[in-house]
């Protein structure tokens, strides 16, 4: 999928979420390993008050107009900082009003995600291994 296709598709997803609808999408790429592999399906639902907390996975739009589905690593008064689980560095800082959806995850997922966030300084090592076994 090209970047323009991604922008078009997620623009449509953004519109559906703003109408209050949940949307199923397929994950592309490895930026959310180990939790979501390329090809996995996730369900995005509209953001509700109280949803924007560290550890949740959200759909956001960067200042440049790119859409990302990444995990919240820091919550500020006006901005949210996101990082893909499969990324060692390279965060996105997104205004709160550009967070459109949240991935429905169970309690076990959120617990494991908190452990993964805690492992951030050393997670390059398990990621090296995971990227090799999850290649298509």
Image (cartoon, rainbow, N blue to C red):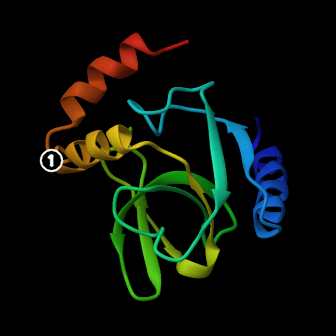
Residue at image location 27% in from the left, 39% down from the top: 112
Residue lying at 82% horizontally and 45% vertically, measured from the top left: 5
Residue at the spot x=36%, y=44% of the render? 107
Outermost residue, bottom direction? 77
Tell me residue 35's x, y (percent): 42, 33
Give the total number of marks visible in the rendering: 1
* Whether residue 53 is situated above or below residue 121 in the rendered picture: below
Q: Residue 70, percent across and down?
A: 49, 52
Pointer 1 residue: 121
Q: Position of residue 100 (x, y in %)?
A: 65, 66
Image quadrant of residue 45?
bottom right
Find numbered disc 1 in the image and state the secondary structure of the residue it sits on.
loop
Q: Quadrant of the C terminus?
A: top right
Q: Which residue appears at 57% of the width and 26% of the height? A: 38
Q: Quadrant of residue 17?
A: bottom right
Relative depth, front residue between 47 and 40 = 47
Residue 23: image x %, image y %? 75, 47
Q: Is residue 51 left or right of residue 28?
A: left
Figure check: 134 above or below 72 = above
Considering depth in this image, is 65 or 68 the residue closer to the camera? 68
């Amino acid at each position: 999928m090209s970047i323009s296709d991604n922008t078009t598709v997620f623009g449509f997803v953004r519109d559906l979420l703003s109408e209050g609808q949940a949307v199923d999408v397929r994950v592309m790429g490895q930026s959310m390993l180990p939790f979501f592999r390329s090809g996995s399906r996730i369900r995005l639902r509209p953001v509700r008050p109280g949803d924007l907390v560290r550890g949740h996975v959200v759909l956001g739009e960067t200042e440049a107009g790119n859409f990302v589905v990444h995990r919240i690593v820091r919550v500020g008064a006006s901005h949210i900082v996101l990082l893909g689980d499969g990324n060692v560095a390279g965060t996105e800082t997104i205004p709160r009003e550009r967070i459109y959806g949240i991935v429905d995850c169970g309690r076990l997922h959120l617990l494991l995600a908190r452990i993964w966030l805690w492992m951030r300084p050393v997670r390059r090592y398990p990621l090296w291994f995971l990227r090799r076994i999850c290649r298509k």
